[in-house]
Amino acid sequence: MGTSQKMLTNERPIRRGRPKRPHAVILAGGKGTRLAPLTTVLPKPLMPLGDGPILDVLLRQLAVQGWREVTLAVGHMASLIRAYCGNGSRYGLKLRYLEEDEPLGTVGPLAFLPESARRRPVLVMNGDLLTNLRFTDLVAAHAASGATASIAVQRRDVQMEFGVMDLGDRVGDSCRILNYREKPLLEATVSMGVYVFEPGALDLIEPGVRLDLPELILRLLERDQTVAGYPFDGFWLDIGRHSDYQQALEDYERMKDALLAPVEALQ
């Protein structure tokens, strides 16, 4: 087995009577190598942002949007994340931890979710993103689509760092160049790192075997399963590079009230 499941019990009673939501999982086990050397002393989800870390924002957002239980999939410097987040009582959450003994990829740890969580849809998100996406809206769109998996997506301009050429017919051992664009700005639809999976998708994840998200999506498509993209044009930032982290620091100060607003205030 490549991971172990550990649960800390919340001291605060869980509120009842709400509709049952998908179980929420935050992927917080990566090494964050692109943010080195900062991530040699802190795991990326604990990088400071305002008066707390990035992970603090996600947990508070889930709480105000009605979630009461969250699983943290941890690995790199797991003890620091566990020490900071504890049992989740200060968020009004019950936190569970799935700790990798060895790296299992982005979705590999999901194979070790308890059966009670795997019997219903699961909301999964990266632990290094900043967004004002309402996770409840993504869940509702997923349910309406009938898809086996849904991915929150956004249109982004991608700056190419090289000259880009379109090639035509072969000319001897070469190809005819039809067009040349020097470091063009290309538009692409990109994943925001927030997903909803049905139990049938989780069944394709083998316990203890490394599996990344793109491989899981390809497995679903090969089996003719519907994978839906949920377009979102609001605020989203993936904190993967030093420049992204600096941008997150600036954006958070400007947007923190909106990012942490109760669901009713976002109607």
Image (cartoon, grey):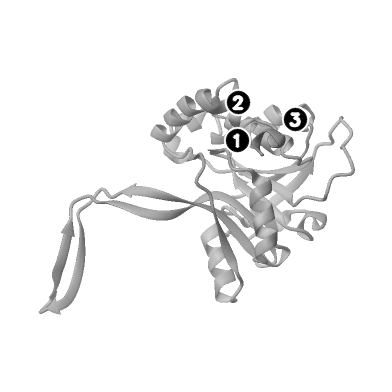
Report, in whole angstroms, how far the alpha carbon at label 3 lies from the one at label 1.
Answer: 22 Å
Q: Is residue 17 above or below residue 106?
A: above
Mark 3 or 2, closer to the camera: 2
Position in image of residue 67 (x %, y %) = 76, 41
Dot 3, crowdedness within 10 Å: few (<14), some or many (≥20)?
A: some
| Residue 266 falls left or right of residue 66 | left
Residue in view at x 48 percent, y 39 percent = 237
Q: Are marks 3 and 1 in contact (CB under 8 Å)?
A: no
Choose the circle earlier in sequence order: 3 or 1: 1
Amino acid bearing label 1: Met
Q: Which mark is residue 257?
A: 2
Residue 139 placement, left or right of 17: left
Spatial distance from mark 1 to mark 2, Cα to Cα? 30 Å
Labels 1 & 2 near each other (Cβ < 8 A): no
Q: For the residue labelled by badge 3, is the local secondary structure a helix, a strand or a loop?
A: helix
Q: Which residue is mark 3?
A: 91
Under circle 1, the secondary element is: loop
Q: Residue at x 60, y 76 (%)?
A: 223
Amino acid found under the numbered disc labelled 3: Tyr
Disc number lying in front (1 or 2)? 2
Sequence-first disc among 3 and 2: 3
Q: Which residue is mark 1?
A: 77
Q: Is residue 9 left or right of residue 109?
A: right
